[in-house]
Amino acid sequence: NFAILNGNIIERSEAKVDVEDRGYQFGDGVYEVIRVYNGKMFTVNEHLNRFEKSLNSIGITLPCTKEHLTGLLEELIAKNNLKLGTIYMQITRGVAPRNHAFPAENITPSLVAYTKEVDRPLESLKAGVRTIVTEDIRWLRCDIKSLNLLGNLLAKQKATVEGCFEAIQHRSEEVTEGSSSNIFVVKNGVVSTHQSDNLILKGITKDVILQVCTNNNIVVEERAFTLEELANADEVFLSSTTAEVIPIIEVDRKPVADGLPGSITRKLQELFEQEIE
Ligand code: PDD
């Protein structure tokens, strides 16, 4: 099994990080998770564009061109003979003596990427999942796909100990997003999801769903919906690179509508599947 370390493909067991890597010490870096279906990356350009945006917003320059990086990732997929799975990729500011301030002289960013075999979540896609609601305690730049995930981790862990798949976060009355997913509600045929601003990650899967809705005359709007709207929704679902479109059948131990995946959610699952084929 191989990994990418700073532009080279090497044995994964040889890929080592310095104790003063700023990602390791400060979470001073950003990441992406890319889906691989049939040995090919899904929406790779969108992921690399978001990666570059995240990097630029913390003052790191992508150390190579996106074309070069795409080629390298393709090579990694081939070498690991990955058919169905994910690529995890991160860049940190690099290695320097520990100091909160950025290093004065230019240091080389550390790039790491590796692959994992991951099945599609067929059972959850079919039956739906249970969720809890929790306060969004994260910072105000959730649009950056930062390595700092403690807020997300604490939310996810709360859901996990309650036997739930995801934690739906809110800031006062407004729902923002899941701990590692975007959240959608459907009411009277209208699909709503939080606008892509600084309070959420602009999900690539979310954007595919918005496009699919538009192309198929499903009314969709990007706006912050409330906890009350969540509780009274006809349908609720979540999206992410690994989850795709998963129905939410329970929120805080109360069933969503009749407690079964809704018809628009089913339709969107069908349409999403056509995108990945
Ligand atoms: N998580 N919101 C948050 C906070 C996320 O971490 C993610 C993805 C999403 C969905 O984005 P996308 O559709 O681009 O995957 C929304 C990834 C999968 C992860 O951290 O593993």
Image (cartoon, helix red, strand yellow):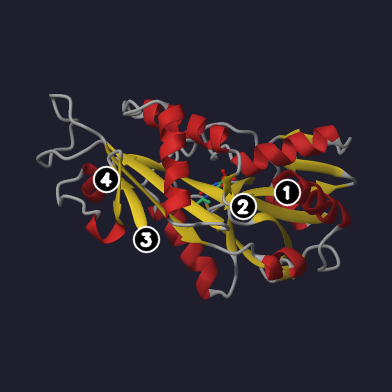
Could you tell me which secondary element the residue under label 4 belongs to? helix
Front position among marks 4 and 2: 2
Cβ at disc 3 under 8 Å from ligand 1: no
Q: Which residue is mark 3?
A: 1
Q: Hey, what amino acid is under mark 2?
A: Tyr
Q: Position of residue 118 (x, y in %)?
A: 54, 62
Query: How many other residues sit within 10 Å of disc 4, few (<14), some (14-19) or many (≥20)?
Result: many
Dots 1 and 2: beta carbons under 8 Å? no
Q: In whole angstroms, how far apart are the C-alphas of marks 3 and 1?
A: 26 Å
Could you tell me which secondary element the residue under label 2 belongs to? strand
Tell which circle, 3 or 2, labels the residue nearer the N-terminal end. 3
- Quarter holding the N terminus is bottom left
Instruction: Give above or below for 232 relative to 221.
Output: below
Tell which circle, 1 or 4, labels the residue nearer the N-terminal end. 4
Residue at screen point 73% across, 41% down? 209
Q: Hey, what amino acid is under mark 1?
A: Glu
In this view, the residue farthest toward the left is 97
Q: Hey, what amino acid is under mark 3?
A: Asn
Nearer-the-camera pick, 114 or 99: 114
Q: Which residue is mark 1?
A: 277
Residue at screen point 40% across, 46% down? 89
Could you tell me which secondary element the residue under label 1 belongs to? loop
Q: In whole angstroms, how far apart are the C-alphas of marks 1 and 4?
A: 36 Å
Tell which circle, 4 or 3, labels the residue nearer the N-terminal end. 3
Q: Which residue is mark 2?
A: 37
Q: Position of residue 87 (x, y in %)?
A: 47, 50
